[in-house]
Amino acid sequence: MSNSKNSLPLSHAKGSQLLIINIQEKLARAMPKPDRDLMVSNITRLSQAASLLDIPIVLSEHYGKGLGKTLPEIAQHLPKHTKAKDKLTFSCCTAPGFEEELGQHDQRKQIIIVGLEAHICVLQTAAGLQQWGYQVFVVEDAIASRHALHCKNALHRMRQGGVQITNSESVVFEWMGDAAQPNFKKVSALFR
């Protein structure tokens, strides 16, 4: 997994963790409906693909008491052992216990980020993960902000900062690598 500026990094199933940030009831309802629907659909597909390909999923919730739990349409596709890390900090990286949770899979140095909101928690978490030495991928069709300009600005800032901006289908097909992958038919069917 090269970090050279002259190469295009790809995500790898054996090196990845999927990080789902704050896809909670009240927060999701504040997003523009078309953006929310696209984001939820793509997070659901990424979660299902990650489960089929044995990729760990890390889940955060911001102030769960006030903003609610992870949307049921996403939660139902997560492995049973997935527990949300409740936080009050905007960056997951400053939340107690988060570094240890990622460290449970210390050979997996690529973090694939999806969630809310792009210009606050996603951006701050991406910056923190880079400081910790992770290779960060943000899935642009699986994030949102209340205002499209904020999301656009966050994507621009992250790209300028060396974060890999990608999309859900690219990530999944990079995880699989080729059509000989045993779960290829099940995973590729998620995107038809």
Image (tube, rainbow, N blue to C red):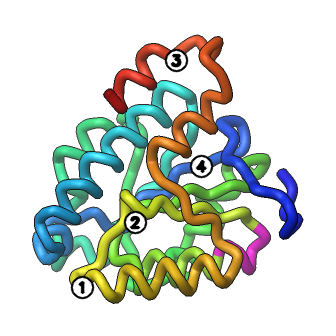
Please identify the quadrant where the C terminus is shown.
top left
* Helix, strand or loop status at disc 3: helix
Q: Which residues are magenta?
A: 129-133
Which of marks 3 and 4 precedes in the sequence?
4
Q: Going 49% across and 57% down the picture, which residue do you hit?
A: 19
> Residue placed at 60% from the left, 16% from the top?
179
Given this view, does label 1 or label 4 mark the residue nearer the observer? 1
* Residue 21 circle label: 2
Amino acid type at mark 3: Phe
User: What is the distance, in whole Å, between disc 1 and disc 3 at their CAs?
Assistant: 36 Å
The residue singled out by tag 1 in the image is: 147
Residue placed most toward the observer, 168 or 25 = 168
| Among the 4 quarters of the image, the one containing residue 86 | bottom left
**Can residue 16 be seen here?**
yes
Q: Looking at the image, which is closer to me, 71 or 86?
A: 71
Residue placed at 65% from the left, 83% from the top? 160
Callout 1–callout 4 Cβ contact below 8 Å: no
Report whether 6 appears left or right of 22.
right
Residue on which disc 4 sits: 17
- Residue type (three-letter) at the residue carrying disc 2: Ile
